[in-house]
Every structure is written in C-alpha cells, then in structure tokens.
Image (tube, coloured by chain):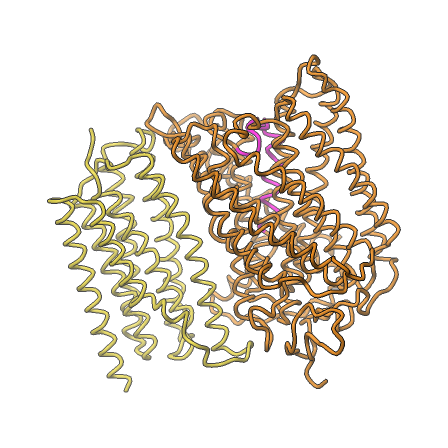
Amino acid sequence: MADINKKSNLRLGLIIFGLLTILTLVEFGLAIYLNIWGLLALLAIIKAGLVMYYYMHIYRLFEPDKETIHHSYAYKIVTNRLGLWLFMLSDAFIFGGLLISRFNLMGFTRPELSQPLGLVVTSVLLVSSFFANRAETSMATGDRKQFVISTVVTMVLGILFILGVLGVEWQLAPFKAADGVQGAVFYSMTGFHVFHVLTGVIFLGIVLRNGIRGLYSEEKHWAVEAAAVYWHFVDVVWIFFYPALYLIGIVIK
Amino acid sequence: MKKFFSLGLIRGLIWQVIGTGIGVGFVTLLRVLMGLPAWKAEPATVFGALLGVLFFLIGVGAITDWYKMAKGEEVEEMTDESHLGKMRYFGASLDHKVIGIQYMVLSIILMSVGGMFALIFRTELAETGMQFLTLIEYNTLMSLHGIVMIVSILVGIAAIMNYTVPLLLGASDMAFPRLNAFSFWIAVPSGLVLLSSLFLGGFDTGWTGYPPLSVRAPLGMQMFFLGVALVGFTSILGSINIIATIIRLRSKGMTPFRMPIFIWAAIATSIISLTATQLIGLSFEMVMFQRLFGMGFFDPIKGGNPILFQHLFWFYSHPAVYVFVLPGLGIISELLPVFARKPLFGYKWVAMSSLGIALVGFLVWGHHMFTSGMAEYLRVPFMYSTLLVAIPTGVKFFSWVATLWRGKITFPVPMLFILASIVVFLLGGLTGPPNATISTDLHLQDTYYIVGHFHDTLFGGFMFPFFAAVYYWFPKMTGRRLNEKLGKIHFWLVTPSFFVLSLWMMRIGLLGMRRRIADYDPALQFQTYHQVMTYTGYFIAMGVLVFIINLIWSAKKGEIATGNIWNSRSPEWQVPSPMPMHNYDKQFEVVGEPYDYGIPGSNYVKFDGE
C-alpha cells in the first residue's frame, strides 16, 4: 500500500513539476515575442493555482474533521493548518502591496535586468519546490531516507537562490537601490522575498534536524507539512514577482 | 530583589536595553569596517531599536516555548501558573484571561499617556500665541497623541476580545496560546520604541506620516515608523488567533447564528486587521527605506510618487477605524439586551452588518484623499462607497433603538456608558457624510470639524463601550464589582464634557479653525471656545482618573460579586467568578437563542450533567 502511495505521489509531483516547467518556458517565450501583460498574468495565476492545489493542498482546509474532540491531535492539526493559511493570507497582502507599488511607480516599464538570469534563478526555486513536495510526501509515506535527501536538496537550492539573488543579481544589476524608482522597486521586492526564503531555509533546517532525530512519523509530522507549505508559499510569491520584475513591460534607459 | 528580577517584564526591559546597545554597536562597527565615518545616528538607532524589541521578546520569555519546540523538546500544553499569584501578570503567561488583563492594563496606561499629551497641547491652545511649547514640541505631542491613542485602542480591543471570546465560545483557551502571549508582548517594547521618538527629536507630520515631510523629519520619525510597524504584529497575529479560535473552538451546538453577537464583531474586526494591517506596515517600511537607503519610492525627483504612500496608508488606516469601532458596537449589541431585558432586535441583520461594514470598509480609503491630487475619476466612486457604509451602520442603530423600545431598562454604570456611546456614535455617524461628499469635504478637509467627527466616532465606538465592557466584565475578572458611585462620577465627569468638547470642535472647524496647527489668529475669536474645550479636556481626564482609582480600589476592596450580578444569559455568567484556569469545569451545549430575554423557560446554554 505504502509503495503504491509512494509511486503515485512521485508521479503526481513530477507531472505538476513538468507542467510548471512548461508554463514557465511558455511564459518566457511569450514575454520575449509577444509581451501581452494580461496573458503573462494569467499564466502566473495558473501556475500559482497548480502549486496551491497540488503542492500546498489548499483543499485540506475544507475537509471535514475526522475527530471532533477539541484536545485531540487530529483536531489541533486542522486548527494549525487554518492558522498557517491565515498567516500566509496576511503575508500575501504585503507582497500584493509591493506588486501594486511596482505597477504604480513603473507602469509597463521594467527594471533593466538580464532576462535569462531571471529564468535561471526562477528555475532554481521551481526545482526546489518539487523537492519540498517530495520531502513532505516521503514523510507522509514513512520514507525517512528520501525525506532527508529531499529536504537537503531543497535547502541547498534555497541557499543557491539566496546567493543567486544577493550575490549575482544584486551585483550585476546596472543600478543601485538609490538609483531612481527601478532601484527602489527591484531591491525592495527581491529583498522582502529573499528574507522569506531565508526564513523558509531556517524552518527547513529545523525540520531536517528533528526529522533525522526521528521526531516525526507518518501520522504526526505537522512541522514537515508546515515547512513545505510555507516553502511553496514563498514560491508562489515568486511566481508573481518573476514576471513583474523580469517579463512584463519594456526597459526604458 | 531577586524576585523583582525574575519578573518577565523586568528581564525583558533589561534585555531590550542590551539589545539596543548591541544593535547600535553593530552598525557602528560595520561602518568602521567599511571605512565610513563611524557614527551615523539614523541607521544605528533604527537597527538598535529593532534588535531591542527582539531581545525584549527573548528576555520576557515569549519565544522560549517555540525555541524548545524547534529543538525538539516537549513543551507542556499549559503550565499552571496560579502559584505565581499576581506575579503572573508581569511575565509571559499563556492564559487568555491573564493576557486579556495584561492588554487591558497596557491599554489604560497608553490611554493615560496619550491623554496627557492631549492635555499638554490643549493647554497650549487655550490662548493664542505660543505659551510654553516650541513648535516642534507641539507637533510631536499632537502626533504622538494620535498614534498613542490608536495603539491604545488596538490594545484595548485586543483586551476585550482576548478576555471574552474564549469565554463566550466555551473554549478552554485561544487556539494558539503561545502566539497570543507573543502578540501581547511585542506591543510593550514597540510601544516604548514609539514613545522614544519624544526624546529623539520628535516628529512633525501628525500620525499619518506623509512623505515628503516625513522624509525630512527628525530622527523621532523613524522610531514612530518602526514602533507602529511592530505594533502591527499585535494586530495581525492577534487576529489570526481570534479567527482560528472562533472557527475551531466553539462549543457544541453553537451554530453561526447562535454565537453571541460580539463574536461576529470580533471576526469582522479580525478580517480587517489580519489583512490590511500589512499595508500600513509596508508603507511605513518604504519611507524608512527611503530615509535609510535613499530608495526613491516617494521622491518625485527619482520618479517616485508621494500619492502612492497615501493609497497604501489609507488602505489600512481607514478600515482601521472599523477595527476600532466594530468591537465597541459589538459590545453595545451584546450588553443592550441584558439591561433592556429584551431579545436583541434583528440578530441576523446585526451580525451581517458587522461583516458588511468590514467588507465595504476595504473600498472607501480614497475619501481621505479628495484633496490630495489623486486621479480625478476616483473621487465619485469613493464618495459612493463611503456613503454605503451608512447602511450597515444604520442597521445597527435600528436594532439598538428597537431593542430598547419598551424594554425594562435598568441603569447601572455599564448601561449608562452603553447609552452614551449610542448617542455619541450617532453624532459621529451623522457628521460623517459631509466628509464623504466631495463638495463639502473640500471645505472641511483639515479643519477641526474632522477632529470633532472622529473623536465622536472613536469615543462612541470605542472609548465608552470599552468603559462599559470593563464595568461589565470586571466582576468576572476579579470576583469583585467596580464601585457604582465612583462609576457614576466617572460617567458624569466624562460624558457632558465630551459633548461640549466634540460639538465645539466641529463648530469652530466649520468656522475655519484648521486642525494640527499650534497657533491661531486671535481675530478668529476662537479663544473662548478653546479655553472651554481645554477645561472639558481636564474634566475628561479627571473622570478617567476616577476610573483608574476605581479599578485599583475595587480590585482589592470592592463589593464581592461572584454570581450572575447582571442576570445575563451568557455562559460565562452561569458559573462563579473569577474563572478558574481552564475556564469551564463542565462543558456546555448551546440549546437556544442567545438573547431571548424575557421569554420564560428559555435557556441559551445547558451545562453537562444538568
């Protein structure tokens, strides 16, 4: 039974990852050749929807309770899940505010950034999301080894993303934070996002350490689920930030 | 002495000082290493203040349990702190009742501080010309009065919601007790950061902090921004807790339309503070970044847009008004049936009106910006959406009047405050549409009329209901009731003075008195008005002083009241006061409507085994 679950989980994860990859490439191509912002926004929404449904399991919020006693573990997990989603909803407003500021200040122009480089950073995050999902589903099916491997890979990719943004993007960008409105928009948006990635890496690190020490089981692994869902949330934010920073609009020098 | 230093609050404060020092030192060291001039006050102070707040939270013990969880240690579900006695109010407690009282005390302290600021600059205004304040001092006090009162109100509604929501629902605590403690304790150091602006040059923008003025204001401005942005977390995390508690921890049989009406108000409030609060934080952070790193968000020379700040700011700060008043209006609806001995008229409509106000509230922020130079075509839609708010609010008034109609009304102190708040909030409400209508607003913008209007809404929507709630639930907290005689003195000192104050504010506003200014032309002939308003300010302060004395005195020596002294149907009054650690010893089931007062044989709740 567990083996069948493992396989179907892996297959689903791969299918979603494949779809996201294709959509990201389509998005990139569209941006280069057509650059219709509505189409790009639509693609981002589809991608976010896929992640939220298949990786973040938003439908779990609406499942009926298996247990109705308030002090039971199962009931508390559902409460925790609600709390986490409320937190992410709240956090989404800060990112929404940043997006609105970006379009208010820059309209349909975009910062002077290298589009291929943006695609590379994005793919790093995209792959990490696949492994975060793998880590969670492995724990749910009791595959400890796979959980450890996937978590480590996710963390490494996350750190690569942070280094890529701070070490490469920020250094290569032809403007500084104080240079005009594009500097303000670019550094604040990536800064806020990288900060969230950093917290996600720390969260994953805690989960990894406790996972190696055997504190989680197939039935009780709320922390793993929370860390993975949070990681995907940060990914969803980037799904919107990426086109807003790199794809939509034209560069004005 | 050792006992003194073991108090969470004291440890937190010591840690905050240490943290601030480390932060300042770190930035200075970094500058030295980078080869820059060592001392630059602004980044050092901001980073120091931020680190100080984090250190406070470590010192007070608000994150100890989370740290243990992260290390994989078991934490106790809930420690019994009753052996600590009164000391548990000074440390990180997980009991929602303790946290509720902590919030209440903090709110009253902040209210007194903010009120004191008002008294000082009110005294200055009693005569034309500058008497004893400099202009920047006046501006700082006026700005801090605004923001400290707002923080006090946010803390005050958190007090009421924290204390009552689990009791009304029949839950043993909030959904996330540790988060609850964290939400409270972050307000304390952030409040200190906010007040520290007084000693760091002050700031002169008013509580709105508009750029470009706020970009040029003294260092105190940064402390204001940082303090408010951090206090925001109290609101955000608190509302996560409230929503999760209401959705998940209702007792058996409590279907949505059998919840106490205050719960509806709490959930409507929490929806706003959960989401919109982030945007005031963001707007303030953006100005901070502009000051620290030269980012040009609001600098037109760099292509920025100062109006953007106002959009982001008011997207929270208008709904914030509904955050302040919705719990107060909920208390009115909650208490009115108790003292009128009649069912609440139109329960479902009142419940929906709270949600209606909250949701419409998201669409109205532009009415603060009619004169700002925002796009012209936005004016009319914002005018109509603003006027729309009157409909759900009107539903509430209709319900209150109909509830009072032919009731067997009694007039203990909570009821007096409830009735006053209805009248005052009505005044606040009726004076609103002229500000929402563009043609009149262009005249009224930035006058004392606005000042009178929002003091009416906030006194009617928060202050009076808050007093009522404290008088009403105080016996539940302590087992003793507040002194009625002192309560009546409090009421009669505050209410008539407040009417004079707010109505005259509006009057001189209509005649041309500008708000926020430190001085006015004697030829305007406002001096007499200002003098009387200053006197009324002192009367209100005396009333609040009586209230505080009453709280302290009655907590120790008040008349003992452990039973259902208000004859309420609400579950928390069916058990003796004060409540034990985990609230109800026996669970209850909801078997009837909450407000069927005067209907013989009806029950709201049935306790297990009865």
- Is A103 above or below relative to B162? above
The outermost residue toward the left is A33
Q: In the figure, is residue B537 to the left or right of B315?
A: right
Q: In the figure, is residue B358 to the left or right of B160?
A: left
Determine if the magenta segment contains residue B189: yes
* Place of residue B215 in the rendered image (x, y in percent of width and height, measured from the top left): 47, 27
Q: Nearer the viewer, residue B242 or B217?
A: B242
Magenta-colored span = B186-208
Q: Colour of chain B?
A: orange
Q: Quadrant of the N terminus of chain A?
A: bottom left
The outermost residue toward the front is B406
Quarter residue B523 falls in: top right
* Place of residue B424 in the rendered image (x, y in percent of width and height, measured from the top left): 70, 43
* Place of residue B507 in the rendered image (x, y in percent of width and height, measured from the top left): 68, 28
Q: Residue at x 71, y 23 (%)?
A: B125
Q: Which secondary structure is most common in the magenta stretch?
A: helix
Whether residue B29 is visible here, answered yes or no, is no
* Place of residue B460 in the rendered image (x, y in percent of width and height, measured from the top left): 68, 45
Q: Nearer the viewer, residue B506 or B110?
A: B506
Quarter residue A59 falls in: bottom left
Q: Colour of chain A?
A: yellow
